[in-house]
Image (cartoon, grey):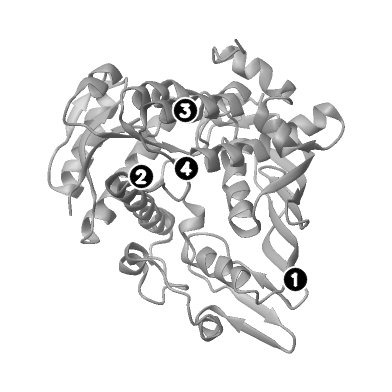
Amino acid sequence: MEKVPICLVGCGGMGHRHVMGYKELQESGIGNLDLVAVCDIRRENAELVANEAERLLGRKPMVFDDLDQVLAHPNIAAVDVVTDGSTHHAVGVPALEAGKHTMVEKPLGITVRACQTMIDAAQGSGAVLATAENYRRDTPNRLVRAIIDHGLLGDPYLMIQTSLGGDDSMAITPWRHLKEKGAIGLDMGVHYADIIRYYMGEYSEIFGRGLIVEPVRRKPDHADHPLISYRERAKTYPETVEATGEDSVIALYTMASGAVVQLSYVGGGRGSQGWERSVHGRFGAVYAPGERNGRPVVLRLEGKELKGKEILPLLPQFELNEITERLFGKQGVEYEPPVDADHAVFAVDAKHLAIEYHDFGEAILSGTGPEVDGESGMKAVAAIVGAYESALAKHSVSMEAVLSGEVQQYQADIDAALGLDAP
């Protein structure tokens, strides 16, 4: 298969994780992207990732510390943007305007307007724009979607997504607690917002709020972190950071179908604990296990409970696509993560990244749209910032109003800081 030459832009912790994804894609036997270059404004970071790529992939990519040089290079057709969320549009727009196909880590942007600038640039140049959203790639989530699509629950009327608990340590990096950088409430919330839309369809109305549960975050202990990039960068962190951005979001959504979704993501609070993802219909309910753990989906119908592979006989048309089968097995709706718990999340995450990459490469080579395009990425962002907008407006807001910019009080000062004021 022809391979698309791609440059990884952003060589921090997520950049290292993305290289692991390229390794999984290469080892799948149907890789369609070729990591030919890496770029970071810190040359030493780019060199570190390039050396890691050489170790994992067998060839050292070109190293850049200037995005303009990447965009001018005739042998680079695509970019993989893994900088912090507040800079995604600053990298993505010029890349798309230069005709480079662009995949952007979630969140696509930290405001709706930032997302829209990239969508407009992609439409103007004809380049492919994809959002890297990995949770939906996990095989249990594929199975839940099939259960809903095949009507095993009847028409869903309720989804519950709850994730409670944390402490006062920094969520990986200090910037994830700063409003103008895209704090953890958004950074993590878009994962859940995308899963909600993947399961339940389009959003209609949003009512909710964001909040800061932990006002001061302390330096994390990354001494035993499995990725050296995290251990090294953590040495430069301040001892504490005062949070200006939300670490939590609580929202009630009405979907276009009429179904209701309850979202509670609380990334702090020492006494809170709990996790649930469930969908309820007249005929039954389904419980998802979360991501990257391989535990089975639980389907409860009247008088019986089925788990994981036991559900498959009810779904004779269900199948995973080729890249997912190669990475997780033909019936990989439940799987065993690696034994080493410290590395398990990253190992499974690398497989999800490989599935994202393959989808992106296929979109470029075949001319079809990626599964998670710019519009999808923007809607996930809008679902979370819409909850923040709702709190300021003191009433529910429509998804349409958030996407159109009619409602954007919360985002206004962020857009101004990003240089994205309305014309």
* Few, some or many residues within 10 Å of mark 3 (<14, 14–19, 20+): many
From the top left corner, tell me how far across and down residue 27 is, in percent.
22, 59
Residue with the mark numbered 2: 17
* Mark 4 touches mark 1? (CB < 8 Å): no
* Gap in angstroms between the C-alphas marked 4 and 2: 21 Å
Question: In the rendered structure, which disc, 3 or 2, sits on the residue that comes first in sequence?
Answer: 2
Residue with the mark numbered 4: 373
* Few, some or many residues within 10 Å of mark 4 (<14, 14–19, 20+): many
Task: Check the image and name the residue furthest to the bottom.
Answer: 303
Amino acid type shown at disc 2: Arg
What mark, if any, has residue 22 been given in the picture? none
Task: Check the image and name the residue furthest to the left.
Answer: 59
Q: Is residue 416 above or below residue 403?
A: above
- Which residue: 66% across, 84% down? 305
Q: Nearer the viewer, residue 259 or 7?
A: 259
* Few, some or many residues within 10 Å of mark 1 (<14, 14–19, 20+): some
Residue with the mark numbered 3: 118
Question: In the rendered structure, which disc, 3 or 4, sits on the residue that comes first in sequence?
Answer: 3
